[in-house]
Amino acid sequence: FPADMFANEDGGPEPDWVITEREQFSDFRDLNKDGKMDKDEIQHWILPQDYDHALAEARHLVYESDVDKDQKLTKEEVLDNWNMFVGSQATNYGEDLTRNHDEL
């Protein structure tokens, strides 16, 4: 896996990021320790069952847009960061922003 991203042609030491990727692969990606990733391991990596993508995206949007850090978004905070919201799957790529919302 790391060899696809880095070819050590000069025989020198590997960069830290390659060492980190090797550790990530062996510790977290190659669950059955056979040296390669099978279909189930790839699925677990891309869509981990213990990770809520929608919640993570919503938290990211609030964290990045909530200027006064009150954990609430004002209309101005959303409009000031419109490009982040229209590019987000959490807002259905901006479609949900065109609907009337009582909370805004």
Image (cartoon, rainbow, N blue to C red):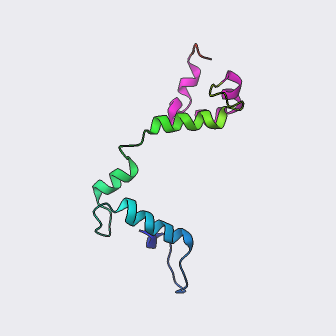
Query: Where in the figure is residue 31, as x and y percent of width and height?
Result: 31, 60
Up-down relation of residue 98 to residue 5 (above or below): above
Residue at 71% across, 24% down? 76
Q: Is residue 82 magenta?
A: yes
Q: Residue furthest bottom?
A: 11
Q: Position of residue 32 (x, y in %)?
A: 27, 63
Q: Main secondary structure of the magenta part?
A: helix
Quick check: 59 above or below 14?
above
The magenta stretch is 74-99
Pick the front one: 86 or 36: 36
Instruction: Using the image as rendered, state which of residue 90 and residue 93 is in the foreground.
Output: 90
Residue 25 to residue 73: above or below: below
Residue occupying image coordinates x 53% and y 24% = 96
* Image quarter of the C terminus: top right
Nearer to me, 68 or 86: 68
Quadrant into which the N terminus falls: bottom left
Q: Nearer the viewer, residue 17 or 27?
A: 27
Q: Is residue 87 visible?
A: no
x%, y% of residue 84?
62, 37
Which picture quadrant has residue 72?
Answer: top right
Magenta stretch contains residue 21:
no
Quarter holding residue 102: top right
